[in-house]
Structures are given as structure tokens and as C-alpha cells.
Image: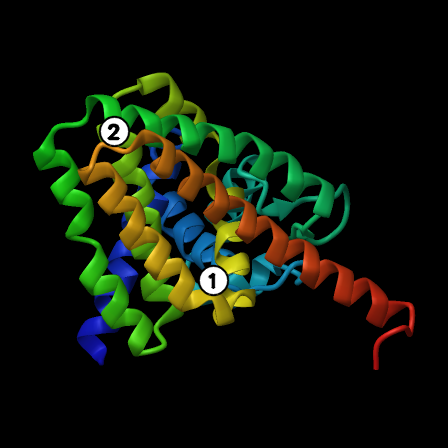
Amino acid sequence: MAGEDQSIKTDSQREMARVLESADRTNPRVTSIAQWIGCAIIEGRLQPGDDLNTVDLSKQFQTSRTPVKEALLLLEKEGLVTIPPYRRPFVTRVSLEEVREIYQVRVNLLMLTAELIVNTASDEDIASLRAFLLPMREMAAAHDIDGVFWASVAFRNREAEIGGNRQVKRILDSLGLRTLQLRHLSMKLGRTYAEQRLSDRERLVGAYEERDASLAVALTGAMVRRSLKIFEQSEDVRAKKDSGQVA
């Protein structure tokens, strides 16, 4: 089990480092702190609205408050942290409007990527996507949500790479850590769709292998829209609870 945890940690840190790399190249300590806090937010260990006490964090990381503050500034740029004037920083709350806007951009970019893969990717590149499928199914069977999530992130990153359009990849990357937070939350809320999610991904790779652009684009769109629908349904239930309509 320890080995699995370390693997997940490595996958998550690798992705965090990739996203944060261009934002701060001069201070590895700051980046390391930002990675840890960012992962905690993305994976839900820190919830929207939670306070981020710089004194407590500096003790946890055995450093002064300055690197912690700089790390929080990095995460503020990524949309994960809010730093109000003269108040304690906190984990940014999730807005349904923001989620819809992000998913609207994301679904179109991923559908374009799917079409590019069918039309331009080599057989070897497409085979590299199939290599993700068995480990993801094994992690799902072990109820390892974080493991499946980071493998899914790596799968999408590989799609963007073999799609071959650097501008599409750049725009997807620019959506940054905020998108990872929303994707993890959707996966966690939609546990009942785990089997369908895996089956759809297997069908997607099959569509790539068969060079079936229509099916690949349709599957990609359906998968992303389902993630948005899961989030919308959870927000609707929460709103009804807040208004006393749901017990």
C-alpha cells in the first residue's frame, strides 16, 4: 500500500510541477509548498472556504511565513486560493457559473483534440493511450479515486501531446489547477458512473484505433458534459438543502 501511495504522490506532484513550472522557477521551496497545498485542495483535503493560516503552514513546512505567502500567491493566480485584503487567505469557493464556463471551453478543445488524434496521430501514439486503461481499471477496482484521477489527468495530457496542435495544448494548460479541482470533484461526486467512465474511455481508445473521428468526438463530448451534469446536479441538491426543500 505504501508503494501505491508514493506512486500517486509522484503522479500528482509531477502534474503540479508541470503546471506551476512557468509561474515560479527561482524558488523550489515555494513551488514545493504550493504543490502540497494545491494537491490538498484538488483532492478535497482542503475544502472551499477553508482558512489557510500562514502561521500554521509555516510551522508545518518548517519555514518562515514568506515562502508560504509566496506559495499562496502562486495558487491565487491559479484560482485555487483567495487572498482578501487584511484577512486570512482561504480556499476559493466554487461557482457554478465558473464551472459552466470552464467546461464550455474544455469540451470544445477536447473534441477538437479527439478529431486531431484520429486524423494525425501515429499508431504508436494511439497505442500509448491504451497503456493507461488497465492500470486505471485496477485502481478503480481498488476504490482508489485519487489514483484513477491522476491517471486520467495523465491520459488527457497525453491526448493533447499526440493531437499535435500546440495552441490547443497551451490553452488547455492555461485552464490550470482550477480545472483539476473541478475534475476531481466531479469524479468524486460521480462515483456511481465509475464503470461507465472507464468503459467510455476504452471505447474512445478503440475509436482512435479505428480512425473513427465521429465516434471519438461524440464520446469525448459526452464524457465532458456528463462531468458537468454531475456537478450541476450536486449543486442543485445543495441549494435545495440550504432552502429546506431536501431533508
**Residue drawn at (40%, 59%) of the image:** 197
Label 2 sits on a secondary structure element that is: helix
Which residue type carries mark 1? Answer: Glu
Left or right, 119 with respect to 76, comes to: left
Neighbor class of circle 2 (other Cα within 10 Å; few <14, some 14-19, many 20+) is many
Disc 2 versus disc 1: nearer the observer: 2
Left or right, 55 with respect to 133, comes to: right
Up the image or down, 49 lies above or below 161; here it is below
Neighbor class of circle 1 (other Cα within 10 Å; few <14, some 14-19, many 20+) is many
Q: Residue furthest left?
A: 124
Up the image or down, 123 lies above or below 99; here it is above
Dot 2 or dot 1, earlier in sequence: 1
Q: How many marks?
A: 2
Per the rendering, the mark at residue 43 is: 1
Left or right, 188 with respect to 158, comes to: right
Q: Quadrant of residue 209?
A: top left
**Residue drawn at (23%, 71%) of the image:** 138
Left or right, 193 with respect to 21, comes to: right
Residue 79 at least partly seen: yes
**Residue drawn at (71%, 47%) of the image:** 96
Q: Which residue is mark 2?
A: 118
Which residue type carries mark 2? Answer: Val
